């Protein structure tokens, strides 16, 4: 199924049904009173978050959603039937934005979360409603209240515990494939990954979800290479795994490019806990890889780990580090009982 993380749709609640103008006309009843019933209420529009969807692709083929209108009131004081509500099901992690994409109107972050988004119009009054001691035969009725309609955007931000970030061709997809059952496309050229991928990682007694987003480039926070959309998929993560290709020339420059884009994007991405790894150590050998790591640590003042996603070197240790961070961030407690002991 093709991945789609943005969609524009048009929604409309149901309008209320009109009231009925009716009088009681029965045999042997010369002056029957008013008995026109009220109109039915229009259907509401709801959004529900479900975990069986992971893309918005269905909204590319259907953009218009309308709830049922309320039915007319009837004689004998019968109220019209209400219109059926419409429930629009979206993936967990979906944001609902206004037509300009400036304001977040709702954010569905939990499975089973349901919100009423548009209210259907109330039904109009029939003439029986207006009967009084001074007006025994009213002929007044009201139409139903109008529906509500909106043009909105749906934006999906993946729900993941760990986000993989880095420049194109750093080996992020290979790492995801080596540590989970995910099968992302892998090839030896930049921009192999064109849309985010998710994988479930099993570590000790805990599972966590890892998201691999397409490689970022300078200017990603302003939308270059669709980077602003890709960065949105790591907004909700507890930790970031920063993957750097150790075979490139300017390691510090590669690291600082990504860190700059995180800061420019905002949403507190730059303050998320981060593990830095130099990947593809098998391509240059252990000794040179260690020299590269030492040089990078000196330049950025942070610990740098050496791995090879292809051979699996040190991958397990990194996963245990990530699991520990996720455990602490999600539950507010530190590792205990050896749950993350890699030995």
Image (cartoon, rainbow, N blue to C red):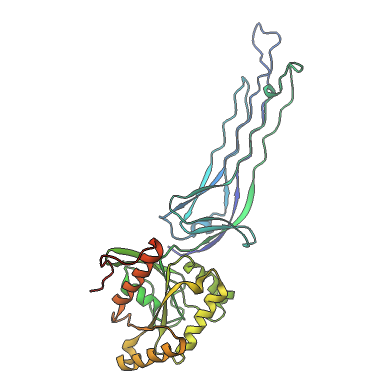
- The reply, left or right, for residue 328 in relation to residue 45 is left
Residue visible at 60% across and 44% down in the picture? 13
Above or below for 286 versus 260: below
Above or below for 64 versus 284: above
Foreground residue among 291 and 44? 291
Residue 291: name its quadrant: bottom left
Question: Can you give x and y, in whole percent of width and height, for residue 109 in the image?
Answer: 47, 57
- The reply, left or right, for residue 109 in relation to residue 67 is left
Residue 305: name its quadrant: bottom left
Total labels: the figure holds 0
Residue 187: name its quadrant: bottom left
Residue found farthest to the right: 134
Question: Can you give x and y, in whole percent of width and height, for residue 205 in the image?
Answer: 27, 63
Question: Can you give x and y, in whole percent of width and height, for residue 338 in the image?
Answer: 25, 68
- The reply, left or right, for residue 122 in relation to residue 251 is right
Dividing the image into 4 quarters, which one contains the C terminus? bottom left
Question: Can you give x and y, in whole percent of width and height, for residue 234 in the image?
Answer: 47, 69
Residue visible at 27% across and 66% down in the picture? 339
Residue found farthest to the left: 343
Dividing the image into 4 quarters, which one contains the N terminus? bottom left
């Amino acid at each position: 199924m093709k991945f789609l993380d943005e969609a524009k749709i048009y929604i409309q609640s149901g309008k209320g049904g009109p009231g009925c103008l009716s009088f009681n006309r029965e045999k042997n009843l010369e002056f029957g009173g008013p008995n026109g019933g009220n109109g039915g209420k229009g259907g509401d529009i709801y959004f529900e978050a479900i975990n069986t969807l992971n893309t918005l692709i269905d909204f590319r083929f259907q953009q218009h959603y309308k709830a049922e209108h309320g039915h007319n009131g009837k004689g004998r004081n019968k109220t019209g039937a209400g219109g059926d509500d419409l429930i629009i099901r979206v993936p967990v992690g979906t944001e609902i934005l206004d037509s300009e994409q400036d304001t977040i109107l709702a954010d569905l972050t939990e499975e089973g979360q349901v919100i009423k988004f548009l209210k259907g119009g109330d039904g109009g009054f029939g003439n029986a409603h207006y009967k009084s001691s001074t007006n025994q035969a009213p002929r007044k009725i009201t139409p139903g209240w109008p529906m509500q309609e909106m043009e909105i955007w749906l934006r999906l931000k993946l729900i993941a515990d760990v986000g993989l970030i880095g420049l194109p061709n750093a080996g992020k997809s290979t790492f995801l494939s080596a540590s989970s059952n995910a099968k992302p496309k892998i090839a030896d050229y930049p921009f192999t990954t064109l849309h985010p991928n998710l994988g479930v990682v099993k570590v000790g007694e805990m599972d966590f979800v890892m998201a691999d987003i397409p490689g970022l480039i300078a200017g990603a926070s302003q939308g270059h290479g669709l980077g602003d959309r890709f960065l949105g998929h790591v907004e909700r993560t507890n930790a970031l795994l920063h993957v750097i290709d150790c075979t490139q020339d300017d390691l510090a420059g590669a690291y600082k490019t990504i860190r700059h884009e995180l800061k420019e994007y905002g949403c507190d991405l730059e303050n998320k806990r981060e593990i830095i790894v130099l990947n593809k150590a098998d391509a240059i050998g252990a000794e040179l890889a260690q020299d590269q790591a030492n040089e990078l640590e000196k330049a950025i003042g942070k610990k740098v780990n050496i791995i090879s996603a292809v051979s699996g070197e040190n991958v397990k240790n990194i996963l245990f580090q990530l699991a520990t961070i996720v455990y602490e961030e999600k539950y507010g407690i530190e590792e205990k009982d050896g749950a993350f002991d890699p030995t």
